[in-house]
Image (cartoon, grey):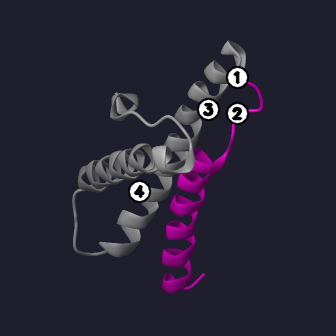
Amino acid sequence: MRRYSQLLLATLTILLLAALVILLEIPERTRFWFELFTAGHTLVFGLCALACLWLSQLVARGRIHFRLSHYIIAFFLAVLVGGATEIIQPFVGRDGELSDLY
C-alpha cells in the first residue's frame, strides 16, 4: 500500500473511532448499558491509540529514531482525540466530561 493511502487509512480510522464514540447512542438508560458503553471506551480508545501509533510511524518515518518517541506521540494523540470527543459530546445530546479521560 502506498504511503499516502496508509496515511489516509490511519486518519480515517481515528476519525471513525471518534465518531463511533460521539454518535453511538445507548439503547436504554439502564445501568447495564451505561457500564457497557463505558467499558467499550477502553477498546475504542485502545484501537485509536494503535491507529495513532501507526500514523506517527508513517508521518515521522526516518526522522524519529527512538521507538519510544512514537509511543509517546501516539499516547498524546489518543488523549487529544479523547478530549475532543468529550468536548463535542454535549453538542450532540450526550454527556461529555473531561474527567472521563482519567
Question: What's the distance in space between the residues labelled 2 and 4, CA to CA?
Answer: 29 Å
Q: What residue is shown at x 58% (from left), y 45% (from top)?
A: 21
Residue labelled with disc 1:
29
Residue labelled with disc 2:
26
Query: Marks 2 and 4: which is nearer the front?
Result: 2
Q: Mark 3 or mark 4, which has the lower sequence index?
A: 3
Viewer-side residue, 100 vs 92: 92
Q: What element carries label 2?
A: loop
| Quadrant assignment for the N terminus | bottom right
Specify few, some or many for label 3: CA neighbours under 10 Å numbering under 14, 14-19, or 20 or more. Answer: few
* Majority secondary structure in the magenta region: helix
Expressed as whole percent of the image width and height from the top left, the position of residue 90 reads 47, 44
- Position of 31 with respect to 13 (left or right) is right
Q: Label 2 amino acid?
A: Ile
Q: Is mark 4 on a helix, strand or loop?
A: helix
Q: Mark 2 or mark 4, which has the lower sequence index?
A: 2
Q: What residue is shown at x 57% (from left), y 72% (from top)?
A: 9
Question: What's the distance in space between the residues labelled 1 and 3, CA to CA?
Answer: 16 Å
Point out which mark residue 53 bears. 4
Question: What's the distance in space between the residues labelled 2 and 1, CA to CA?
Answer: 7 Å
Question: What's the distance in space between the residues labelled 4 and 1, CA to CA?
Answer: 35 Å
Expressed as whole percent of the image width and height from the top left, the position of residue 56 reads 36, 64
Query: Marks 4 and 1: which is nearer the front?
Result: 1
Tag 2 and tag 1, C-beta contact below 8 Å: yes
Residue labelled with disc 3:
40
The stretch of residues the image draws in magenta is 1-29
- Position of 13 with respect to 71 (left or right) is right
Specify few, some or many for label 4: CA neighbours under 10 Å numbering under 14, 14-19, or 20 or more. Answer: many
Q: Label 3 amino acid?
A: Gly
Question: What's the distance in space between the residues labelled 2 and 3, CA to CA?
Answer: 12 Å
